[in-house]
Image (tube, rainbow, N blue to C red):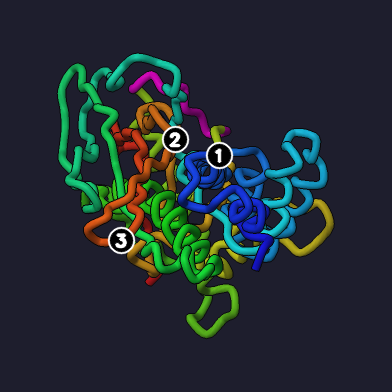
Amino acid sequence: MKKGLFISDWGAFERMGGLNSPEARHMLKGALNTFAKLPTTAPFKAAAQAFARTGDVGVAKSTLAQAFATNANDFPTSVLEVLDKYHQLVYYDTGYEEIFNMMDMRNSDRNGFTIVDVGSGMSFSKIPLGTKAKLYKMSGEKVTVTLDQYAAGLSWSRLLFDDKEYWTIEDNAITFMNEAYSSRAQDFYDLIEDLAATYDLAWQGVTGSIPATNENYVPIRDINTINKACEEILIRIKDLGMGATPMSEFIILAPIQLIGRIRRAIGMVQQPFAGSTTQINYNVRPIYTMMLTATDKYYVIYPKNKLKAAIRADLAVFSNFDPSAYQDAAYGWQRYGGAIGEQKQLERCSVA
């Protein structure tokens, strides 16, 4: 193997002297960091959004390939060689970025952001290396959400380099990157799933005298549940200065197991003729994810506003050699924070 996934040419790495060469080690570190930042580029974000809309991995990969072709001039040739192979392997879940008000604080010198008038909220706090974020409740006139560091480590035995087992090295790197971005996404989805039971909504009854055996019985109950959730949210937040109206957009965050049901409900029309309107009374848009714990619940959300998040630093990789273990240790660090400043913007809906 000479052509790689994050090293475009392992042969060049060898000719430079491999890990015995400071220049080659620097190249390896640079390639790994370039690789780590790919999910923040436009093509990968487009692919993630495509998956969030459809729940279809094939659509995400197709979107990614199309984005590369459209934006090829945005990348140097060496990076394009990596992308050409890499896009076939993975995509990242960034659906939460359409729910939270994402603030870019990469070039700031601040260690947090504030949310004013927090009636009922929650955030996640700093965690030890490699462990999962812990959630905590918050309330008050003004709450500061800190931007903390999150990290994980990856080790490669020098024997892998000695024996030129580059596939194993790259497979480990791919897994490492996936876990880093997955962990960040999971933190935000955990915030949503930690919604208080106060905001649980039962599966609403059917409209009219339709028996449970009728093919429209389930979608009509789902429609009534979605409509009721939107109504409940609008009533709760109407005096909170969020500018919500019956025409505002709501997000339906659903596990991929409910794709068929959500699509059926959203697409169901009042009467089956051209130009007929849907039975959903509100402007809703689905986002699908594989990262929710419960597969029999979904969330109707009035997005942004006091659902806030910020990225302080993208994933960066630092490495060193440990001679006592004959291995190279790489540590990935990223820094971000997030909070739900007002739980009244969400409703957890049942499907049975």
- Which amino acid type corresponds to the residue marked 3 in the rendered image? Tyr
Q: Label 2 vs label 1: CA separation? A: 8 Å
Q: Where residue 314 is drawn, which disc sits there? A: 2
Q: Which residue lies furthest to the bottom in this view?
A: 213
What count of labels does the image hold?
A: 3
Residue 257 visible in image: no
Amino acid type at mark 2: Asp
> Mark 3 = which residue?
326
The span picked out in magenta is 240-247
The answer to whether residue 314 is above or below residue 230 is above
Q: Mark 1 points at which residue?
A: 40
Choose between 319 and 46: the one closer to the eye. Answer: 319
Name the amino acid, label 1.
Thr
User: Mark 3 to mark 1: distance in Å?
Assistant: 33 Å
Left of 243 or right of it: where is 129? left
* Label 1 crowd bin: few (<14), some (14–19), many (20+), radius 10 Å: few
Q: Which residue occupies 41% across, 60% down?
A: 291
Q: In this view, does 135 lie to the left or right of 247?
A: left
Disc 1, SS: helix
- The structure residue drawn at horizontal position 59% and vertical position 42%, both measured from the top left corner, is 283
Q: Residue 298 carries which label?
A: none
The residues tagged by marks 3 and 2 sit, at their Cα atoms, a distance apart of 29 Å
Magenta stretch, overall SS: loop
Of label 3 and label 2, which has the lower sequence position? 2
Asked where in the image residue 112 lies, by quadrant, the reply is: top left
Q: In which quarter of the image is residue 260?
A: bottom right
